[in-house]
Image (cartoon, grey):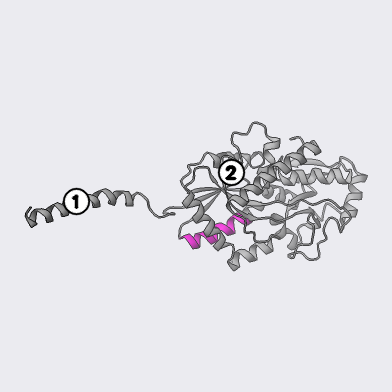
Amino acid sequence: MKPSVVLYALFTLVAGISVLTGPAQSQTPAWPDKPITFIVPFAAGGGTDAFARPLAAQLDTQLGKRVLIENRAGAGGTVGASAAAKAAPDGYTFFMGAAHHAIAPSLYPNLDYNFEKDFIAVALIARPPQVIVVNPEKVAAKTLAEFIAYAKANPGKMNYGSAGAGTTHHLAGELFKILTKTNIQHVPYRGAGPAMQDLIAGHVPVVFDGLGSSAGPIRAGQLRALAVAAPKRVPAFPDLPTAAEAGLPGYEVSTWYGLFAPKNTPPAVVQQMVSELQKAMQTPAIKEAWERNGSDVPNVTGDAFAKMVSAEVERWRKVVTEANVKLD
């Protein structure tokens, strides 16, 4: 065979390979190449927002793409969870779930999603404790003991607000009633934000809230904190006693917030998001915001986080059963 024929054949082969590989490479663009959405299943201004928004801002900077917050409130956070479970698993929609979503399966028998099977657990984001906060204009009690005494002396005359039926706020209130043998009526809201607004305005006298959404109003003097439902005091509020210190042993309730992806989201994208989250959580801005909101900076991701979620679902199932909690 003539050399010119051999060279022509090699040129044709290389050109053919280029044609075949070129388009395939162009079909796998780097992630992300467009904005990312975090679905937050509660109204703006609540505890989930207190952590989701600073995190989104930090990821904006790291990724060079917008990370948008979409608040979709309703039914104790299950409306937003349902929307997120049905989102395209393309790596551009994530879900900011919370402890409330581990409670929901025990209270909502007809959910159209499965919290453990329809999401990929990406990372635990924050875990602030609950706190008992009152409107200082509506509640004269300065201590938890005084508040309990007032509630006992006025059965059925006081209401407490929550982020919604079936949320940790709701169950924290019910647990408080069980331990103190008091009768306080539950008023569910469409998220901690609206509940906080009504508490500050004096429309409800007390909320059993996550410290993330209460920290600011406490510092501003708009709310009075009576006790934190944690085994030890929170560094951000060193003068605030634990419930046990204030005379209510056994009252410990914390919440948590985590990032999830719809099932079938590409593993490479999930792993890259984990890496970005770990980087973000070590920045001074996030560390300061988390401390200000009463949370540590956790490092629980992937399978470890998924196991934690499953344990939480089982834990709250037992609490709901033992407390005989019913939706209002």
How crowded pointer 1 is (Cα within 10 Å; few <14, some 14-19, many 20+) is rated as few
- Which quarter of the rendered picture does the C terminus lie within? top right
Q: Which mark is residue 72?
A: 2
Q: Which secondary structure dominates the residues rendered in magenta?
A: helix
Count of marks overlaid on the render:
2
Residue 190, compared with residue 5, is above or below; it is above
Task: Please report the residue visible at 64 percent of the width from the left and 59 percent of the height from the top.
Answer: 298
Q: Is residue 100 visible?
A: no
Task: Please report the residue visible at 80 percent of the width from the left and 49 percent of the height from the top.
Answer: 205
Residue interval drawn in magenta: 50-63
* Extreme residue in the left direction: 2
State left or right for residue 183 relative to residue 268.
right
Residue 21 image position (x, y, % from top left): 28, 50
Task: Please report the residue visible at 84 percent of the width from the left and 42 percent of the height from the top.
Answer: 184
Task: Please report the residue visible at 40 percent of the width from the left and 55 percent of the height from the top.
Answer: 30
Q: Is residue 62 magenta?
A: yes
Residue 234, compared with residue 154, is above or below; it is below
Q: Of residues 232 and 174, which is closer to you in this image?
A: 232
Quadrant location of residue 167?
A: top right
Say what amino acid the circle numbered 2 marks: Arg
Residue 181 image position (x, y, % from top left): 89, 43
Q: Of residues 205 and 78, which is closer to you in this image?
A: 78
| Residue annotated with mark 1 | 13
Say what amino acid the circle numbered 1 marks: Leu
